[in-house]
Image (cartoon, grey):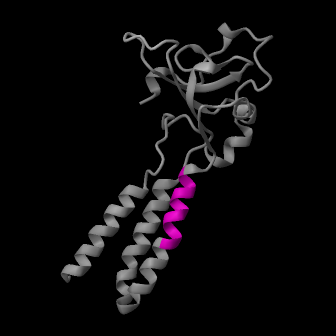
């Protein structure tokens, strides 16, 4: 193998490794349903929020909460992890809701495999390799952000738009919150 082919292989290996996990998922590996199962899923999506402290004294820290999205009320949201957390909306600075499992690893491997196979095209690899990368990279990036609702400084419109993905989209006014249990054991989450 010539030195330039080794450089191209190294470049493709590095690129595909980077593309396999474009967007970090906050959800545990065994929590999110497959894309086909989302319409039948009765549980809420995985919500991750970062909240600011009420005051900026040295002992107060920014907090990150993750768990099943239970409900969005007028002034707070409810997340279920090992217990229920009620987080005031005014303190939330960033929010990410995930609905289903992504296939970025599979897509990244296809782009990598197809790109490596273009080396067998000889002189035409100069045409087919860029075509693989031009089609593959946007596909992997699009897959990583599909069914993912992210925002900084969430507004009322944001909360109204994702409310339908909560376990109780109508709210929890008439529901006994102590009876709500997670669908997984905390020890199962890795």
- Horizontally, is 1 left or right of 171 in the view? left
Above or below residue 118? Residue 84 is above
Tell me which residue sits at (36%, 57%) in the image: 17
Q: Quadrant of the N terminus?
A: bottom left
Q: Is residue 43 magenta?
A: no
Above or below residue 17? Residue 189 is above
Residue numbers of the magenta segment: 134-144
Residue 177 x/y as whole percent: 68, 10
Q: Quadrant of the C terminus?
A: top left
Above or below residue 81? Residue 173 is above
Tell me which residue sits at (53%, 71%) in the image: 135
- State the count of labels: 0
- Horizontally, is 39 left or right of 150 in the view? right
Report the magenta stretch's main SS.
Answer: helix
Residue 174 x/y as whole percent: 80, 10
Q: Nearer the viewer, residue 17 or 185?
A: 17
Residue 97 x/y as whole percent: 60, 36
């Amino acid at each position: 193998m010539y030195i330039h082919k080794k450089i191209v292989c190294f470049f493709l290996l590095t690129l595909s490794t980077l593309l396999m996990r474009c967007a970090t998922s906050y959800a545990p590996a065994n929590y999110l349903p497959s894309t086909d199962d989302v319409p039948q899923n009765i549980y809420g999506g995985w919500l991750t929020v970062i909240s600011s402290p009420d005051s900026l004294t040295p002992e107060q820290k920014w907090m990150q909460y993750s768990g099943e999205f239970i409900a969005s009320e007028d002034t707070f949201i409810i997340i279920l992890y090992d217990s229920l957390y009620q987080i005031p909306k005014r303190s939330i600075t960033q929010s990410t809701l995930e609905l289903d499992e992504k296939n970025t690893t599979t897509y990244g491997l296809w782009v990598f495999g197809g790109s490596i196979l273009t080396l067998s095209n000889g002189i035409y690899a100069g045409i087919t390799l860029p075509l693989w990368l031009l089609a593959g990279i946007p596909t992997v990036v699009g897959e990583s952000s599909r069914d993912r609702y992210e925002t900084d400084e969430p507004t009322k419109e944001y909360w109204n738009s994702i409310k339908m993905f909560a376990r109780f989209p109508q709210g929890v006014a008439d529901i006994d919150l102590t009876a709500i249990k997670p669908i997984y054991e905390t020890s199962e989450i890795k």
